Amino acid sequence: MVRVAVYGASGYTGLELLRLLARHPDTRVTALVTRQDEAPHVDEVHPALRGRFDLRLENLSPEQVAERADAVFACLPHAASAEVCRPLLDAGLKVVDLSADYRLTDRAVYERWYNITHPDPDRLGRTPYGLPELFRDQLRGADLVANPGCYPTATILGLAPLLEAGLISTEGITIDAKSGVTGAGRNPKPHLHFPEANENCSAYGVGAHRHMPEIDQVLTGVAGGPVEVVFTPHLVPMDRGELCTCYAAPVGDATTEQLQDCLRARYEGEPFVHVVPNPPGTKDVAYTNNCCVYAARVRGRVVVISVIDNLIKGASGAAVQNFNLMHGLEETTALA
Amino acid sequence: MVRVAVYGASGYTGLELLRLLARHPDTRVTALVTRQDEAPHVDEVHPALRGRFDLRLENLSPEQVAERADAVFACLPHAASAEVCRPLLDAGLKVVDLSADYRLTDRAVYERWYNITHPDPDRLGRTPYGLPELFRDQLRGADLVANPGCYPTATILGLAPLLEAGLISTEGITIDAKSGVTGAGRNPKPHLHFPEANENCSAYGVGAHRHMPEIDQVLTGVAGGPVEVVFTPHLVPMDRGELCTCYAAPVGDATTEQLQDCLRARYEGEPFVHVVPNPPGTKDVAYTNNCCVYAARVRGRVVVISVIDNLIKGASGAAVQNFNLMHGLEETTALA
Amino acid sequence: MVRVAVYGASGYTGLELLRLLARHPDTRVTALVTRQDEAPHVDEVHPALRGRFDLRLENLSPEQVAERADAVFACLPHAASAEVCRPLLDAGLKVVDLSADYRLTDRAVYERWYNITHPDPDRLGRTPYGLPELFRDQLRGADLVANPGCYPTATILGLAPLLEAGLISTEGITIDAKSGVTGAGRNPKPHLHFPEANENCSAYGVGAHRHMPEIDQVLTGVAGGPVEVVFTPHLVPMDRGELCTCYAAPVGDATTEQLQDCLRARYEGEPFVHVVPNPPGTKDVAYTNNCCVYAARVRGRVVVISVIDNLIKGASGAAVQNFNLMHGLEETTALA
Amino acid sequence: MVRVAVYGASGYTGLELLRLLARHPDTRVTALVTRQDEAPHVDEVHPALRGRFDLRLENLSPEQVAERADAVFACLPHAASAEVCRPLLDAGLKVVDLSADYRLTDRAVYERWYNITHPDPDRLGRTPYGLPELFRDQLRGADLVANPGCYPTATILGLAPLLEAGLISTEGITIDAKSGVTGAGRNPKPHLHFPEANENCSAYGVGAHRHMPEIDQVLTGVAGGPVEVVFTPHLVPMDRGELCTCYAAPVGDATTEQLQDCLRARYEGEPFVHVVPNPPGTKDVAYTNNCCVYAARVRGRVVVISVIDNLIKGASGAAVQNFNLMHGLEETTALA
């Protein structure tokens, strides 16, 4: 039984993580850590968890957490996360970090895109990237895992096999992403006010979204040569779900069938990635840890579409999957 | 050409009012008044109005407004509204007040429910209530009109004819109301954050909603005897629209057909109230100034259902209708 | 390991049931029965189940089902359901019937409301009603359980304790219900077409909904005297969730606090019913088997609000809860 | 006063057209034509129009229509439309055709994409394309106008000025479009059933959408050289609104500012096209005839975003704008 603490339990990824942990037979949640001084019961913060945990959120020091828990999920904003992870890792706990802090391997890239000094730079470049479908071997038994961003997850799962196989070019990749509103977090903001976001669709972070260098980095590693994507996320009036439509230039004459065969071969046996013959919808994977991937050749271009639940495969489900691998548990535990 | 100023133009009722005024051939909007010091162009505040008005919001004194305008729509919170209306009325402008300030005739009732000293008590009891279907004669040529609350509008239009005709009892009236989220205003709040309000339905203000004494007052006047309703509003995940399901005890044996006949007779010739043979949906009246009303006898009770667009017949459309009556214009101008 | 067959697996209750059974450690789904001749893989019918079951839907005879399964969940329309349940029960299988066929104890009432001859009248009146919070003892070990309707579940859980305690009158109970659209089933209909149902709210089945006699029957049993409710359901633009606002006349002077105390005492120790101090929203229980109940005294009336997920506590979750009781398993298995 | 008949009045474009015509001071709607034999009152088909028109839908012959009307709006499926337009044009009526029948100038392209023999091929290539911002001179006084498709409208308004100015390449244009569900019409279909389309986002018609050759044709004309776009539309869970994100290769070094300047210069004085400094949302133009356009340079690519209301600027609003030009009326009549 692994004793687990959750930092940042009050947000949407925290909620989703707790939903999954409530069903995990090998863990016991022993601490919900907040940076605020009130200590509400988790039922007040997440009514949907009523009856699952008899815990309050608490403002605990790393020392206190280290006494109560063997492992930690950190659902904190960037920078705040590494500051907390550092002492916990030093104290011997295993950590799944859901923030961006350990994803980028190059400190300079991190500091440029996040506009901040990295609080724990020594672990950059040594921390495995928590996408089991690509890096499973590095994740088994790891002490710290950088849980991927939601857009990178969907995008990389769609494009990596085609880049590996040399079926698409590293140049000119364009990613048009659509996300449900939970992706923007739980803090009320004017443009996320119900009557503003409802019945509305808009692009945001055009040319400036921080998942762009993360996608570049992983696809560059996969392709063995520099990839620089154009990435445009959009807000869609739904709670959850994420769809990435990726456009790439083919190398050679691969047909729709050959593109799909390549994906199918790559993901054979993967429990959570499914290659589908028709364009998938986000609802096909909502409330699951699945990713569905589709590819087609259109007028001399390659179109790849992948869908995930941004809070599960795009965050908390992946975190549990990584946790399972880190602890030598069955990878699909609590996720099936 | 009536020169018009709008107070509180940045909210949803302000937006809807401006949409209607943009089509009104007999008015010219000359001032958009705000209590803040920035002076954004109306296009920044309401992108949906782009190309309609070349105006900025301005923090104007009542004197400045009185110079520029002949009439005012006040879309302000209670108390703030009467404070502004008072000098404008004294300066000779005509005012449609969309707040609650002049609706209740009894100062004590107002002060108890709104928990505040009334800023302009002398006008209470002398200000007509802006429901043309009931009080048209008092509205023609009036200088000040108290524009009704959205829930009272829907409720009263449904119940008043049956009370007038003695077909339902004054006792035991229960109103279960459902409203779109624009009814809660434009300020972001945690429970109105998209992922909280979307896919959610909940009651609010149980036993405490301020439209309750307003409904009591008007129905009491209509019925000629004391009415005290139980009123429970609910939030429904949609932008706009309001549905009131009213339950009453019949007096006598009126059938569904007789109830509907009573309503039809009462509203014959009314341009905006339609008695319908099947339960109406809010979308039947969305983006219109219409109210649809339905009645049925169910197991010895009377069920009356009425629907309006909360921002139009429940606010800005009614305000324009009242404005037209106050200025001797065709009542349906800009509303058809 | 109980071998389980599901009839009517292609609908929304079927989907939800399969989601739950995928997590149930003591069952194995061995047959998905359809009345159509195509035999699609369950992944085609329910993409959200991808990776969970390697099964096709099959048009099987009761004999074939009896060979493959020990227990059956029947998610079929009324009448069709009893026709199938009858031979399965005779063959010794345990059955949870999610249709209305075995809920009403009085054949004449059934035949009047459902306008059909009952296909298995002998089991009426001898089949326990699957609301464990009221009838747990009858459900343990039972061979056939009548799974309750969604509206009756929410309504009865809210009102039964107050009737039992004599705090509210049996007369004049009014129930105003709001439901997400999955409650109307998976068959496309004009009024459920997205652009018709979205941004819309309407009443339906006014005075004619078949859950009315079911509520009457159970509340009559609880109260020990005749109850006849007025029940008005409404469609709300959301996938799932159900909120019942119940209005009743108090007997005596019970305060809000006393009403809530009564509910709390009644449901102490219940794993899935939670008495809450503020009006609950449907999202508080979405994707859970929970029911949240709230009560207040308002102007001399009692208002009781209860929320459930119509597909879980209102259908498939309750079915699994009943299944667990029927098989002597831990009641909360697969539901926590 | 132009007497107007509307074919296909029962769909969503018909509804929206009638809403606009209800406010048009220079028209009188004299016939609503249907191909079915029932003759429902328009209020039954479109409750939202209640009180606007006292008309029934009628199955009228072209001769009957020609007697009653001077002009026609045809909101019919392709092929069905040209069959009706032909005799009406021959009888001397002016026609705005909202179908695809007269948009493509090349009969072979039409017949390949629509898989049908064109019913009125002689008018192909002689019929002006109803995008006033590009072809206003051809539309003034025209007898027949081919009203553009919704996706072409948004796309062309965004890209045409940059192609005209030589700022983007004719090669490699990719259009990722998002549309509300009314774009899919009013006929119920399984994937448009509320619980399927709600909380869902998916691509459709990948590589096969019929608006692709239409976009090609117009952009080719504008650019003076062959354009062949990759176009992927997506369904977004909202009633209306359409957002096109277009990706193109720059020619030269135009900055974001220069791209926006080019657009602003091109659309100066246009009543309905607004160039905006930040990415627009569909709600910025909902229920208006506006198109908002935005452009930016991102990592060596050009991103152009444009939004329209698919039913107004994308269909019925454009149709009224064209009608006004055809009849020598003020272009903005009924649209401001």
Image (cartoon, coloured by chain):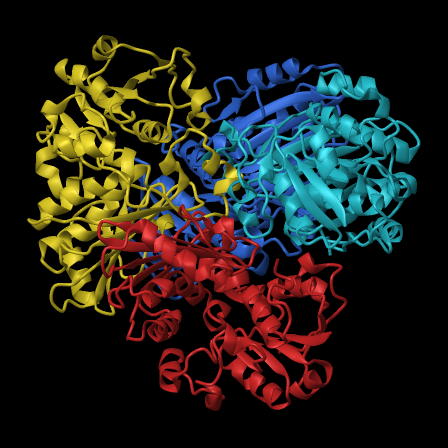
Chain colours: A blue, B red, C yellow, D cyan
Question: At which x and y percent is residue B183?
Answer: 49, 62
Q: Left or right of B38: which side holds B278?
A: left
Q: Compared with residue C218, is residue D122 higher up or lower down, i.e. above or below?
A: above
Asked if residue C146 can be seen in this view, the reply is no
Name above or below for residue D194 compared with residue A82.
Answer: above
Residue in the picture at 27% in, 55% down:
B254
Quarter in which the C terminus of chain B is drawn: bottom right
The reply, left or right, for residue C47 in relation to residue B41 is left
Frontmost residue, B316 versus A31: B316
At 80% from the left edge and 20% from the top edge, which residue is drawn?
Answer: D109
Name the image quarter holding the N terminus of chain B: bottom right
**Quarter occupied by residue D201:** top right
Q: Nearer the viewer, residue D271 or C306?
A: D271
Residue at position x 69%, y 23% from top?
D208
Q: Is residue C334 above or below residue D274?
A: above
Q: Quadrant of residue D300?
A: top right
Residue C61 is at least partly visible in this image: yes
Looking at the picture, how far across and down is residue B64, in whole percent? 70, 85
* Lateral position of residue A22 relative to residue A272, left or right: left
Query: Front-most of B255 and D83?
Result: B255
Q: Residue at x 32, y 71 (%)?
A: B223
Residue C16: percent from left, percent from top: 35, 32
Q: Is residue A287 above or below residue D262?
A: above
- Residue D95's spot in the image, x, y percent? 78, 36
Name the residue at the left extreme. C224
Report how many numbered discs are placed on residues in the image. 0
